[in-house]
Image (cartoon, rainbow, N blue to C red):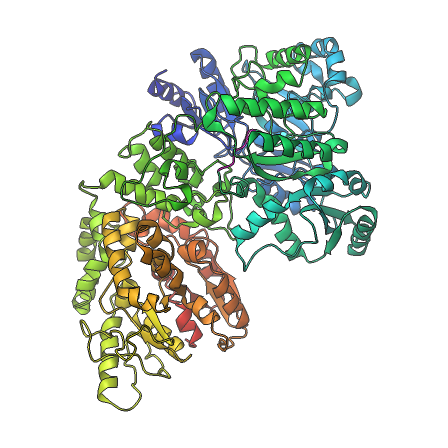
Amino acid sequence: MDEEWVVEGLRRTIAGEVDASARRRAEYSSDASNYRVLPTAVVFPRVDEDVARTVEFARNSGLSITARGAGTSVAGNAVGPGIVLDFSRYMNAVREVDPEQRVARVQPGVVLSELQRRAGVHGLRFGPDPSTQNRCTLGGMIGNNACGPHAVAWGRTSDNVRELRILDGAGAVRTLADDPSVVPGLPEFTRASLAVLRTELGRFDRQASGYGLEHLLPERGSAVAKSFVGSEGTCGILLEAAVALVPLPRATVLTVLGYPDIASAADDVAAVMACDPIAVEGIDARLVDIVRVHRGATSGVPELPRGSGWLFVESAADTAAEAYAAAEKLCRTVGALDAKIVTDAGVAAALWRIRAEGAGLAGRTPAGHPAWPGWEDAAVPPRHLGAYLRDFAALTSDHGVDGLLYGHIGDGCIHVRLDLPIADAPQRFRTFLRDATELVVRYGGSLSGEHGDGRARSQLLSAMYSPEALDVFAGYKALFDPDGVLNPGVLVAPRPIDADLRLVGVRPIERAGGFAFPQDNGDLAAAVHRCVGVGKCRADTRATGGFMCPSYLATADEKDSTRGRARVLQEVVRGALPWSSEAVAESLDLCLSCKACRSDCPAGVDVATYKSEALYRRYRHRPRPMDHYTLGWLPRWLAAMSRMPRAVNAAADIGWLRRIGLRAAGMDPRRAVPRLADRNFRRIWRGLNEQADSSSHPRAAQPAIGRAPAIPSTDIARSPESTDGLPSADDSHPQGVAPREVMLWVDTFTDVFDPEIGLAAVELIESLGYRVRIPQRRVCCGLTWISTGQLDGARARLRATLNALDEHVRGGGIVVGLEPSCTAVLRADLPELLPEDPRAAATAAAVRTLAEFLAEQPNWRPRPRTGQSVVVQPHCHHHAVLGFDTDRRILASMGANVTEVTGCCGLAGNFGMQSGHYDISVAVAENGLLPALRNAAHDSILIADGFSCRTQATQLSGRRGLHLAQFLLGE
């Protein structure tokens, strides 16, 4: 069907947005599953009438309708070939919280964490809490009958709905509660189906596969609304829900129980449940190992009790003492190897995050292979769980697949992602799923325990249910959706499990001279397919410390999420879109190249690198946008301009001239031009060494910009012979570098804009008895070439860098960087752009941040700054590549009152300077930096190691920022 005809028809009809562009269709072609289905169009309804008119249009046009929230469905429940309705953009309100009735009314697109925040004000919460709660929507939870760790106490979503207002497939609005007569024919259907409903459905709590029609039974209250929950968008489209709320526990305590393995933990579940816990989660040792690696040594996993499988058990009571007593009783009752009662809230939160991070981190096997959903949430009655897990381990071994186990042990639901042989579909893929189905059915279990069947398991329902039960499912759907408009191919008349698989047909994309993608065996296609769609990039992390997707936080548009961009690039590597397409350009335009996804995305998606590679492939040997030459070659221009700084600064002060120049250079004329230092660092360095040469007295540093740096305690290393008047290696050490020498990496920004930062770093390093060197020649890490995709130029500059640092590094020397983005290039991009050069890995290993270097000195202690109010803006690359923990510990040890900004400053190197990016740059700053500065005490100090961060703060708030080096010296 002609997409443009659909768009024009819908735009005449609805107030919401309609988009059928190649980019938008790619973004919505998948959810968090293995499936890819390009929709005809995507609609963002604003009001109920938009939904009704869209369904009417679809019916008249022969199109299907698929409802979607955050797109975190792992079974392919939220993709379809017709019109996709995204409720998360506009229909996302908590309309009412009634604390007296303990009920909330919500629209389908509201994120669970927002409902929890609103309910929490009244001491209430929504019971079910899946690990995706900071991005999943209530509509999606109702569609899949979501559960979470606390389902053992507060039930599944179906247990917590009171009333649902829906639009059925025929276009009728219906309010579902406990009256079957609101759906014509439903009472008669129920009476005719009683035998199936009583014998095949509702056998245990986590029997989520198929429809939950046991709720229609009169002995279960004829609960029509509950029967609709878990119908996966096949029977109606949710417009509004009334859901029950439960009181927040007054006191809780976490007990961690250790067992020989996860199956042994499952064997003990009856004893655990006898102690009335409110949550019981199981964790396998291999998942814990993955989390340890992901979090790093400094912020890793708290100590666990002995064992290789653990149960996390939460007990609740009216008082802390009673909760602790319940935990002690639990420890006496169960048969664990070891136990640990956790009363510290911070430690408990760190332990629970293991489970929350599991869904994403389980996307890689311990061997590093991609692991996929498809058989990720089977459930069996809890009494059979231990035996099932042992047989499942044997099954995966027999099929040569592997994965990480975790899940809701208390009610028999196990999550696992496996390195399924999707590329071998339909042979090995289908065979494994058939055998896994046979195993779970043998134990009286369910193919799905909470995620729904979707495209991943609907075809397998015939192995779990009788033909009569399948006929009942079809009859139920027909009452709501007689023409099969809603989410076809799911549950009833299912699509084959191996149809529409995203990976099938994707060929490796070999290196074309750009990045090496060593973690993906050099395959760009494998790299972009790291995104399995878990959607953490859509979470609002401003309160929890995440940095990922600052542009998405500003726009709330899927195109600006890590996932949305990865989906577009997945279309490129499969050959459906060219690198030069407008879809790719639009998708990557607002990527700030902050690299936060590299660390924050549990699948390790690195869109900044993919963007650079995409620009390289698009523009290699072709003319580029003007800003690629101006901003991309910025170090080259700055080196020239720093010879006449006063003239350049004077020209920048002339408003009309500055605006003309910025426009001509492809930059936004609203931006101020950062002022060049009167003397750059390298010039000051020459002067200091010349002064030291001419005097037998300790040199006195000359003022640069601002105050004069303090006098260092030892001389700067110098040599009679130098290039460009700069120090070279000391001839007195012909066999290598003196053990007390440090190479200071003087980046372009420190050199020409903030030389006093370099001088402060020299003073700190020399105060520890080291001699400081800088590279002989002016060299550059190539950052701006990388960010604009000029990778041939970047590699040339990095080779020059290796030449400049090689002797020092071979002698065991350390290289200290000051600008986080440049330091991150040396740490991460260098070996990925020059993998064939053996010097690259050695140099990357020698690079330190200033904080890392200082922390390695056993006798160094920072000067106390007790009570000093400090606002810290970590640079995104510092957070993502280098790690900010060391800086954080240093500041904490000084006794300062630290407010740490979460998220990007918004300038992000060249991004915020480029034409068309100013408004989004400011919006990103409003996510964290600007509110933090407005709320800070009047005497607070801003610490921002990044030149971009300091520039953004100065231009948007008037606040001058200091580098950590300056703060440590007492500025």
- Magenta stretch holds residue 372: yes
User: Is any part of residue 139 visible from this angle?
Assistant: no
Q: Position of residue 459 (x, y in %)?
A: 57, 18
Q: Name the residue at 44% across, 53% down.
A: 880
User: Is any part of residue 477 visible from this angle?
Assistant: yes
Q: Quadrant of residue 512?
A: top left
Q: Is residue 206 above or below residue 404?
A: above
Q: Position of residue 406 (x, y in %)?
A: 63, 40
Q: Position of residue 80 (x, y in %)?
A: 47, 22
Q: Name the residue at 34% across, 66% down.
A: 809
- Magenta stretch holds residue 717: no
Majority SS type along the magenta span: loop
Q: Name the residue at 52% across, 77% down.
A: 864
Q: Position of residue 124 (x, y in %)?
A: 69, 43
Magenta highlight range: 370-374
Q: Is residue 917 above or below residue 710?
A: above
**385 to the left or right of 799:** right
Near-viewer residue (894 or 383): 383
Quarter of the figure with the C terminus: bottom left
Count numbered badges in the picture. 0
Quarter of the figure with the N terminus: top left
Near-viewer residue (480 or 214): 214
Near-viewer residue (91 or 486): 486
Q: Quadrant of residue 401?
A: top right
